[in-house]
Amino acid sequence: MSTTTTLRSAVFPRSSALHNALLIGGGTLFLAALAQVAFPIPGSPVPVTGQTLGVLLIGSSYGAMLGLSTMLTYLLVGIAGAPVFANGGHGIARLSGATGGYLVGMVVASLLVGALAGRKWDQRLRTALPAMLLGDALIFSFGLYWLHSFTGKSWGWTISAGFTPFIFGEVLKIAIAGTSLPIVWRFVQK
């Protein structure tokens, strides 16, 4: 039985600190690029972005600790002033503002999907899809609670501004991540 549990460890079984730093850097750039795929939602401070797809892919491909390190690096780079958040945003205001809960949720989700990938949930369609759904649910749980608290608006408004417009896109992202990872694993295991 193989001890390989994540795509990173399967493709790069002997990784060094330099290799991990390069993966974190590449993952941070990937998340920053997906954040720029942003579409405003009228009446909502939260845009539709590609970030959640990146979080699901990185968390499950890298594993819990490297995925978490990548997300934390992404946040720190953005807080430090690099324009990595949606629409070239940066600074602590993005983390403490209306969208901060989604960003915090992404950190927790990367840890969760990475841990599930460590248990080989990303290797089969029947477990990969629920793993991605759980990760996405975490992102939106943090995001909605934070949005509601930040704006002080009703839960009805919070759901209609912070969740409902995202459903179709999130279903697509979950489907992409949940189906592509098992396919990649088939090639890697050969």
Image (cartoon, grey):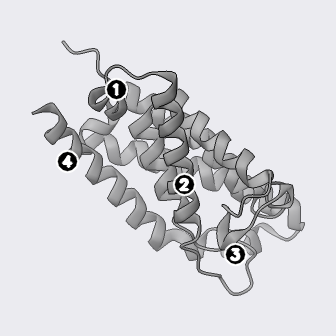
Question: Is 5 above or below relative to 36?
Answer: above
Disc 3/disc 2 C-alpha distance (Å)? 28 Å
Q: Amino acid at mark 2?
A: Leu
Q: Where on the picture, by quarter, is residue 90?
A: bottom right
Cβ atoms under marks 1 and 4 closer than 8 Å: no
Q: Position of residue 42 (x, y in %)?
A: 69, 87
Outermost residue, right side: 152
Label 2 belongs to which residue?
A: 29
Q: Amino acid at mark 4?
A: Ile
What secondary structure is found at the residue carrying circle 2? helix
Label 1 belongs to which residue?
A: 9
Decide which of 81, 109 is in the foreground and name it.
Answer: 81
Q: Which comes sooner in the sequence, label 2 or label 1? A: 1
**Badge 3 local density, few (<14 within 10 Å), some, or many (20+)?**
many
Q: Amino acid at mark 1?
A: Ser
Disc 4 or disc 3, which is closer to the eye?
Answer: 4
Disc 2/disc 1 C-alpha distance (Å)? 21 Å
